[in-house]
Image: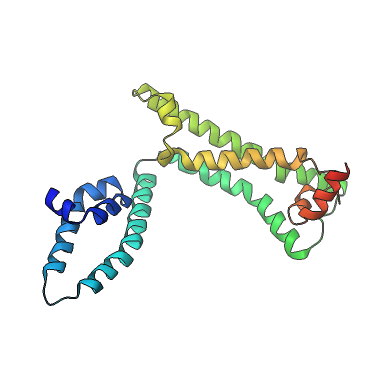
Amino acid sequence: MDGLKHRFPRYSRLLWLYPAGYRMQYEEQMLQTLADMLDDPGRSKASIWARTVLDLPVSAIYQQLSYEGGIMKNETPSYMKRSALLGSIMLLPFWAVVIINSLNNHSIPSSHDWELTYKLLLVGLPVIAFLLNIAAFWRWVATRHKLGTSYLKSLFDFRHNWTVLVVAGLGLLIALFVPFHDSVHCLTGNPVRELHNPHQTLQCILRG
């Protein structure tokens, strides 16, 4: 295979776009197939290279997604997937309010009843989503640590933990943004309103 790598040095480097496992299994075959096509006198070398260049990024992205999907399906514990799914559902009310507010271009009522709903949907649920996914993450880290994996390695093992970390991070950001955003007192007093009225929000903050 070294001879083929020397013959196609640039193409060999591009094969690193594929997942490591896929590359180890099919790299030699892919290089040999390219060599056989280019050595066929009845085929145009330009068209072969054009097709190869166009196909490679599409194929590499597909294999990366398939590989990551396989990790998620086969290697990620079920409790982490459940926590990420439940946490995502808990964050939906925030995004629904933002979208509805943007489409209707009006503020959500600020009555006492709304304030209670607002605290539950836009603060309470994101906090629960954060705690649920952080708990799942630390359970996973502790389990791996017992098997000899360091805490630091588990922290940066994003291929396995990204779902719970993303949901936990979004939950925390939303829970902090809604009640503590600098411009809560501006406009209508509804911080969700700020998301689609940035100019007025900025002017309000600058005026203090």
Judge from the rendering whether residue 128 lies leftward or rightward of residue 48; answer left or right. Answer: right
Q: Quadrant of residue 65?
A: bottom left
Residue 166 in view of the camera: yes
> Which residue is rendered at x = 16% and y = 75% of the image?
43
Residue 1 in view of the camera: no
> Which residue is rendered at x = 26% and y = 46% of the image?
21
- Residue 173 place in picture, x, y as percent: 65, 40
- Residue 108 place in picture, x, y as percent: 81, 55
Q: Which of 134/116 is in front?
A: 134
How is the structure coloured here? rainbow
In this rendering, the count of numbered labels is 0
Q: Quadrant of residue 153?
A: top left
- Residue 196 place in picture, x, y as percent: 74, 57
> Which residue is rendered at x = 19% and y = 58% of the image?
30
Judge from the rendering whether residue 26 lies leftward or rightward of residue 131; answer left or right. Answer: left
Where is 117 relative to 99, above or below?
above
Which residue is most to the bottom? 42
Q: Which of 57/99 is in front?
A: 57
- Residue 180 place in picture, x, y as percent: 76, 37
Q: Quadrant of residue 34?
A: bottom left
Q: Which of 73/205 is in front?
A: 205
> Which residue is rendered at x = 35% and y = 60% of the image?
57
